[in-house]
Image: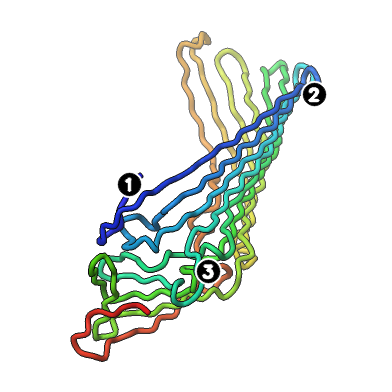
Amino acid sequence: MARQTGYTKTPYTFEQDEKRFEGKATGALTSGQRLEVGYTGIARQQRNSAWPGSSSVMDLASLTNPNLPESLAEVHYTGTFGSRFFLEAQYSARAFTFKQSGGLKTDLINGTVLRDQQTGAYWWSPNFCGVCTDEKRDNDSLLLKGSYFVSTGAGSHDIAFGYDGFNDKTRADNHQAGSDYHVWATGSEIVNGTVYPVIDNGFSTFIIHWPLQQNSQGTNFRTHSLFLNDSWALDRHWSFNLGLRYDRNAGRDASNALVAKDSLISPRLGLSWDPTGSGRTTVRASGGRYVDAINRTSRLRRISGSSGASASARMRVSCAASGFRRSSWI
């Protein structure tokens, strides 16, 4: 895919090579039991990737070649026991890794990012660190569900019950550059395709240090849920849906501090009325409480000074010579 850098208009080609591998096996354990195992692997390699976009980088040195492998493994079991009881179990695990997604140099010269404060564009070196700890975004889930059907003098009941668990794990050391330094210049000038920083009087240029005070231990946000639901058909005219769910969560941030711990019971009630009993007209009403997952923004936020997050220290720079406009970066 043909692209060009911002402002300097240097042409380059963005490429993405993606290979997908899939496998699935199905077997009957008995006449009423079935097992499925599946795996999907994705090998994704990008060439000349620009962050945050091609219009926001001004040279080819700011491009990266990230490797983004991804995989999903799952096991699914179903079993029928007699005419009334049905059992289902499913486990899945997903892994997603960012490799070489940033600068490959960590020294102060080649690993420091330059930024034009007038345009917001970057040059000289890529943002983030591609040779530090790989960023991982993984999760796994487990579902156990049973269904039981029973008929009584007060109608029929289709009862479902079980457990639902989900674990979201992220590990990232948020280096802002290979050297952990940025230089935010007053502006920039482009001469024969080369970008030079402009440092004006008035302390309008900043040297910013983003130190990583502690390596990330990985975030871990887990949710446990129990549920019970009864679909009750009283007669040809009336049916009810009665449900109860219990959710409990616990979350730890990148420094292993407990930042979320809560639980809630959620009742649900639904009813359906068929005036004639023929199924042609139905009136439905329902109500209940629903619990959402832990807010992703809050759990992924990086608090300055915490594990895996960058604090910042700024030093203002001013040019001593009046009228000085261009400085080569050495």
Q: Earlier in the sequence, mark 2 or mark 3?
A: 2
Q: Residue furthest bottom?
A: 320
Secondary structure under badge 1? Answer: strand
The residue type indicated by label 1 comes to: Ala
Residue at label 1? 2
Is residue 137 shown above or below 84?
below
Task: Tell me if residue 277 can be seen.
Answer: yes
Drawn side of residue 309 relative to residue 246, left or right: left
Badge 2 density bin: few <14, some 14–19, many ≥20, Cα 10 Å = few
Residue at 50 percent of width and 48 percent of height: 45
The residue type indicated by label 3 comes to: Ala
Residue at label 3? 309
Residue 91 position, x and y percent, is: 69, 38
**Marks 2/3: CA distance?**
49 Å
**Marks 1/2: CA distance?**
53 Å
Which of discs 1 and 2 lies nearer the camera? The answer is 1
The residue type indicated by label 2 comes to: Leu
Do the numbered discs 2 and 3 sit on residues whose CB atoms are within 8 Å?
Answer: no
Residue at label 2? 29
Look at the image and name its color scheme.
rainbow
Report the quarter where the C terminus lies. bottom left
Drawn side of residue 268 relative to residue 284, left or right: right
Residue 86 position, x and y percent, is: 73, 24
Residue at 52 percent of width and 22 percent of height: 272
